[in-house]
């Protein structure tokens, strides 16, 4: 029997056609579109329920996933929901769906969200997309661990990043780490960072989750049905980390 150490209630919201019910089915492991479900992931019980953007009571949920289809843009209902979540200080994530559409550019979609929702806290991408030979997203580079999570062969398979990725990783990782460290509430760690000392990736991840839990920072995920459940595990990892953070 799995030892459940903490629980998280997550509301999943988006407009019609964005893929809310499909995402809930994938996150809960049923692989069938649904308006609710739950999943035990890394010793956390995570409960998902669909909600209309204009009818969400933030006192009833622990976190919010805003679903944006890269085919639709960011509608006014999502902008209003995002600002309401920011006022409530609730942890909020963005999931860009339909990455199995080869015409979709995740980084462009993330930039679109950043422009439309920039008044609700810092929106960032902790994973960089990698493309297959057909220019479709097949995996992501974790900027903190510098590992690749690859779905190209049906994965996900975790492997070390390659030399050809290093320049891209270094620039993006440095930018991410700086933004996290400038907002830390640990004076000693901040002084170490300003002195140029190397900071352990686990320390940076800890403070990233702490800032996410306070609604100061909002990660962008990308998901698709092909390759099989692309990106879904990354969403669950982040939610489990947030759940563990809340339980501490």
Image (tube, grey):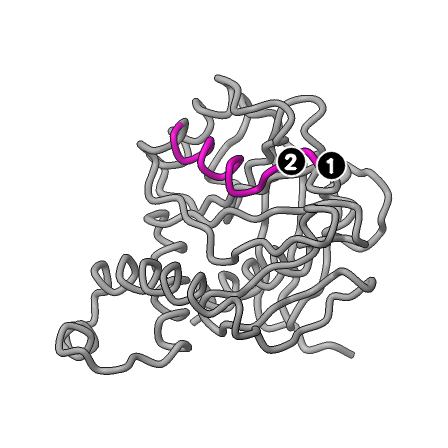
Q: Is residue 109 magenta?
A: yes
* Number of the label disc, if any, that sits on residue 228: none
In x, y percent, where is residue 93?
50, 45
- SS state under label 1: loop
Quadrant location, the N terminus = bottom right
Q: What crowding class fits label 1: few (fewer than 14 Cα within 10 Å), some (14-19), or many (20 or more)?
A: some
The residue that disc 1 covers is: 101
Q: Name the residue nearer the viewer: 209 or 156.
A: 156
Q: Which residues are magenta?
A: 102-115
What secondary structure prevails in the magenta region? helix
In x, y percent, where is residue 191?
13, 76
Q: What crowding class fits label 2: few (fewer than 14 Cα within 10 Å), some (14-19), or many (20 or more)?
A: some
Instruction: Tell me which residue sits at (52%, 62%) in the image.
Output: 243
Q: Is residue 38 left or right of residue 5?
A: right
Instruction: Tell me which residue sits at (46%, 31%) in the image.
Output: 112
Q: Is residue 231 magenta?
A: no
Q: CA distance from mark 1 to mark 2?
A: 6 Å
The residue that disc 2 covers is: 104
Quadrant location, the C terminus = bottom left
Placement of 105 over or under 212, stated as above or below: above
In x, y percent, where is residue 147?
56, 73
Placement of 132 over or under 97, stated as above or below: below
Q: Is residue 17 left or right of residue 208?
A: right
In x, y percent, where is residue 242?
49, 61
- SS state under label 2: loop
């Amino acid at each position: 029997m799995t030892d459940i150490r903490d629980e998280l209630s997550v509301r999943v919201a988006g407009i019609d056609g964005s893929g809310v019910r499909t995402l809930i089915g994938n996150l809960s492991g049923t692989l069938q579109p649904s308006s609710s479900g739950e999943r035990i992931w890394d010793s956390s019980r995570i409960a998902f329920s669909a909600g209309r953007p204009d009818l969400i009571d933030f006192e009833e949920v622990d976190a919010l996933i805003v679903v944006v289809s890269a085919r639709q843009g960011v509608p006014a209902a999502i902008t209003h929901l995002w600002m309401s979540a920011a006022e409530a200080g609730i942890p909020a994530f963005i999931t860009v769906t339909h990455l199995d559409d080869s015409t979709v550019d995740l980084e462009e979609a993330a930039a679109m969200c950043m422009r439309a929702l920039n008044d609700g806290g810092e929106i960032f991408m902790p994973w960089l997309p990698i493309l297959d030979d057909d220019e479709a997203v097949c995996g992501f580079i974790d900027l903190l661990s510098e590992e690749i999570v690859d779905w190209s062969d049906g994965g996900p398979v975790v492997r070390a990043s390659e030399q050809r990725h290093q320049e891209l990783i270094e620039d993006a990782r440095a930018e991410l780490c700086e933004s996290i460290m400038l907002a830390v509430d640990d004076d000693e760690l901040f002084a170490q960072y300003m002195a140029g000392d190397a900071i352990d990736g686990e320390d940076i991840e800890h403070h990233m989750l702490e800032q996410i839990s306070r609604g100061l920072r909002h990660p962008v995920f990308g998901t698709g049905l092909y390759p099989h459940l692309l990106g879904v595990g990354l969403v669950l990892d982040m939610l489990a980390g947030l759940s563990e953070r809340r339980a501490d």
